[in-house]
Image: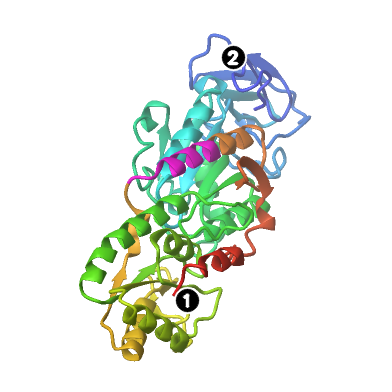
């Protein structure tokens, strides 16, 4: 199939012989018979090939395509038309959904606030162009197992303020838990998906970049992670809300800490980057910030906290990133999850114990954990998700692949995924220098 008039195709072309027919007045899923030249003149990646002259039944969408379509069949049942052609005799072209192409959208990896705002923007922008949107549920698992549902404008109304993701997510990876692109090819073909907008963190975007490189599928990435560690973008979706949640918690912990002359240690997420710890520590008025990017001298820190308490200050707040080395020098983990990924966490307890021994003051730990990923997104993340989603949808419409939207200053830019997914965006040292003026 080849659409002749933009997305709202009025004419289809057999992918093998080039004969055309008019779609005017046809219903969705009508079959159009085209008499083909027995000698194939051209091939197309858009549409499967069935040989009516080779005994294929009218409803069988065959895979005998080596001669006409060497790159393999893609059943465009959601595309401008789904073509069955063989180059011998009669080809039947099935029209579908008024000629609209199909673009998928999925969220993979950890959830974060703002995802639904981004999904809403992607769907709304694509629907405005008459494009069918395939919602892929449970992340890459949905693309591997065919767990999808259609998304239209009505399906995404009222979700901009909702946390989590209406599509669900998982940590399944087609290259780790499958055999790469072939693991998702069946769903791509059956749904007629031409491109996928992938909302993910660094691991998801690495997988997306690889699929774009190795598979017959266009990919547009959208950076989301509360960790803010995706290279190439100044801010990742979800980070702002996570910082606000931590600051709110610090504000509440301050009142109980000062009532008991305690050191309160707050452990936050961030994996191997200290963005959440540093930004929330500055905004929350912490006396110390411990991050993976900078060494911590515990003897010196304990001395500072002791002088602070001796001067009449009845509490101290210490914010520690989950990926920061413990006083022993080792990164604290709690084992592996069910998919074999390392679970960071526990450093807060070790820091509290060390400071309690060195200062003689009671030290308590608050591990915020998944609170940072849940709840209502801030206005900033709703706006950022909306802007990212609109731009990602437009890139998919334009035929782009292997690219990611990114925030550069106040502008939404487009960057090549391969250039950014190979590295982690570590904390800007300038932030630590600015924080040092306020630390114990």
Is residue 111 at least partly visible in the picture? no
Where residue 35 appears, as percent x and y from the top left, is: 67, 19
Residue in the picture at 62% in, 58% down:
231
**Label 1 vs label 2, nearer the camera:** 1
Residue 195 on the magenta segment? no
Frontmost residue, 107 versus 231: 231
Q: Is residue 408 left or right of residue 338?
A: right
Quadrant position of residue 398? top right
Q: Residue 23 bears which disc, if any?
A: 2
Helix, strand or loop at label 1? It is loop
Q: Can residue 303 be seen in this view?
A: yes
Query: Of all residues shown, which one is farthest toward the top?
Result: 25
What secondary structure prevails in the magenta region?
helix
Where is residue 261 drawn, in percent x and y?
Answer: 25, 76
What span is in magenta? 376-389
Give me the disc on residue 76: none
Q: From the top left corner, tell me how far across and down residue 135 is, in percent.
A: 44, 39
Whichever of labels 1 and 2 marks the residue nearer the N terminus, that label is: 2
**Above or below — where is 21 with respect to 192?**
above
Q: Is residue 335 above or below residue 366?
A: below
Between the residue at mark 1 and the residue at mark 2, the CA separation in whole angstroms equals 62 Å
Q: Which residue is drawn at 44% across and 82% down?
A: 301
Q: In this view, does 418 lie above or below 25?
A: below
Say which residue label 1 marks.
324
């Amino acid at each position: 199939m080849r659409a002749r008039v933009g997305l709202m195709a009025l004419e289809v072309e057999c992918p093998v012989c080039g004969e055309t027919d008019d779609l005017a007045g046809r219903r969705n899923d009508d079959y159009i018979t085209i008499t083909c030249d027995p000698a194939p003149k051209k091939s197309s990646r858009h549409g499967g090939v069935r040989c009516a002259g080779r005994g294929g039944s009218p409803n069988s969408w065959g895979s005998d395509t080596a001669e006409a379509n060497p790159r393999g069949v893609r059943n465009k049942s959601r595309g401008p038309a789904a073509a069955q052609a063989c180059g011998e005799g009669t080809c039947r072209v099935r029209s579908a959904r008024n000629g609209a192409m199909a673009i998928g959208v999925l969220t993979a990896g950890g959830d974060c606030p703002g995802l639904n705002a981004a999904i809403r923007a992607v769907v709304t922008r694509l629907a405005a162009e008459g494009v069918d949107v395939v919602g892929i549920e449970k992340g890459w698992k949905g693309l591997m197992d065919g767990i999808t549902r259609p998304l239209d404008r009505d399906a995404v109304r009222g979700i901009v303020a909702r946390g989590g993701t209406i599509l669900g997510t998982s940590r399944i990876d087609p290259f780790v838990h499958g055999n790469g692109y072939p693991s998702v090819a069946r769903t791509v073909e059956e749904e007629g998906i031409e491109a996928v907008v992938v909302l993910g963190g660094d691991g998801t975007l690495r997988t997306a970049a690889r699929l774009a490189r190795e598979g017959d599928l266009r990919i547009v990435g959208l950076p989301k992670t509360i960790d803010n560690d995706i290279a190439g973008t100044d801010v990742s979706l979800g980070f702002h809300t996570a910082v606000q949640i931590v600051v709110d918690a610090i504000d509440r912990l301050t009142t109980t800490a000062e009532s008991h002359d305690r050191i309160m240690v707050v452990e936050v997420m961030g994996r191997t980057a200290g963005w959440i710890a540093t930004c929330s520590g500055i905004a929350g008025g912490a006396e110390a910030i411990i991050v993976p990017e900078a060494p911590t001298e515990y003897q010196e820190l304990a001395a500072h906290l002791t002088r602070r308490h001796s001067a009449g200050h009845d509490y101290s707040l210490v914010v520690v990133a989950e990926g920061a080395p413990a006083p022993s020098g080792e990164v604290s983990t709690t084992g592996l999850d069910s998919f074999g990924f390392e679970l960071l966490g526990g450093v807060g307890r070790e820091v509290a114990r060390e400071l309690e021994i060195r200062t003689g003051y009671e030290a308590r730990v608050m591990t915020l954990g998944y609170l940072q990923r849940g709840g209502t997104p801030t206005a900033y993340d709703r706006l950022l998700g909306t802007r990212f989603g609109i731009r990602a949808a437009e890139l998919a419409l334009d035929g782009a692949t292997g690219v990611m939207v990114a925030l550069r200053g106040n502008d939404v830019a487009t960057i090549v995924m391969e250039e950014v997914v190979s590295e982690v965006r570590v904390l800007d040292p300038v932030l630590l220098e600015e924080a040092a003026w306020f630390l114990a």
